[in-house]
Amino acid sequence: MARTVLVTGGAGGIGRAIAAAFLAVQDTVVLADIDKAEEAAADLGVRGVAVDITDEKSIIRALDEIGPVDVLVNNAGLLGIHGRLLDLPGTDLHALLRTNVLGTFLMTQHVAHRMVQRGTRGAIVNLSSIGGRQPTPGMGGYESSKAAVDAITRWAAVELAEHGIRVNSVAPGPVLTPVLAAGLPEGSPARKAWLDRIPLRRLASVDTVAAAVVFLAGADHITGTSLPVDGGQLLT
C-alpha cells in the first residue's frame, strides 16, 4: 500500500533525489522547504508545501495541510557555514544548531505526535553525516550539529519503539550535488584531497543516498541506527 512520505529540504538536490526514489516505489510524496517547494514539487509532479522547520507554528500549519504522514524524511539542513574552532562566530554555530538540530527535533516531535495519535506504525529517517564521527578541520560546527542529529535519532528510536515507530539516520560522506561539484571541480586538488580519503575513490551520488533512505524507511526491524554512505571513508 502506498505510503505518504514527507521530505523536508525537498527543493535541494538530495531532497529531490529522495522524493524521486519514493515515487519510483509508488509512494505519495510531499516536498517541504522554506523556499521554492512548490517549484520543485511541480517538476516532479508531487505536492509542495512551504515550511520553516525552526518555527512550530509553521510546522503545525504545514502538517495540518498535508494530513496523515507515514514516513518523515528530515533532510532539511544547513551545510555551507564553515570555520575553524578559533574563528567560527557564535552566531554561525547558533544558526547551524537551530536548523540542523532544533529543526530536526521539532519535525520529529510534531510528526511523531500525530503518528501516535493515529496509531500509525511509521518511520522517520534523518539525514546525518559521517562528519559527526570523523572530524574535518573547518567543518566542526556542521559536524557537531550532525552528531546531535544521530543522538536525536537514537533518543527518538528508543522512546517511540513502543508505538511501533522506527527512527534511523543516513550518514553520507561528501555527496556530488551540483553545489559540491561547482566547489570541487573534476580534477581539482580539492576534489583529489576528498577522494584520497575514500577507499572506493568516488563521491556519493544523490541517488545512492536516496536509495539508503528508502531502504531504511522500509526496513521493518531496524531502528536507532546511523547508516554510513561514505565509500568506506570511516575506515580510514
Image (cartoon, rainbow, N blue to C red):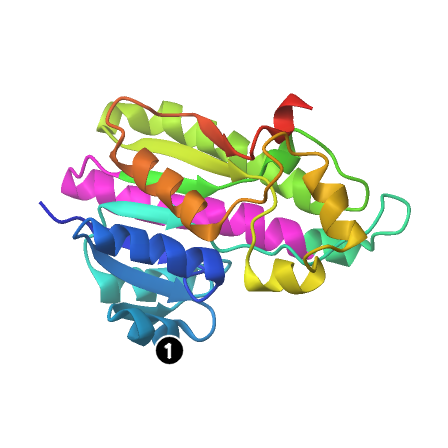
Q: So how many labels did they put on this image?
A: 1
Three-letter code, disc 1: Glu
161 to the left or right of 2 = right
19 to the left or right of 184 = left
Give the answer, above or below, for where 88 lies relative to 225: below
> Which residue extends farthest right?
86
Image quadrant containing the N terminus:
top left
Give the answer, above or below, for where 177 lies relative to 138: below
Residue 96 is covered by the magenta coloring? yes
**For residue 222, which quarter of the picture?**
top left
The local crowd at label 1, few if under 14, some if 14 to 19, many if 20 or more residues have their Cα within 10 Å, is some
Residue interval drawn in magenta? 95-122
Residue at coordinates 63% horizontally, 49% vertically from top-left? 97
* Residue 156 horizontal/vertical position (percent): 40, 31
Q: Which of these two is toward me, 98 or 19?
A: 19
Q: Which of these two is toward me, 176 or 148?
A: 176
Q: Which of these two is toward me, 205 or 212?
A: 205
> Which residue extends farthest front?
187
Residue at coordinates 37% horizontally, 48% vertically from top-left? 73
Can residue 71 be seen in the rendering of this structure?
A: yes
Task: Write down the residue under mark 1.
Answer: 39
Residue 174 is covered by the magenta coloring? no
SS for dot 1? helix
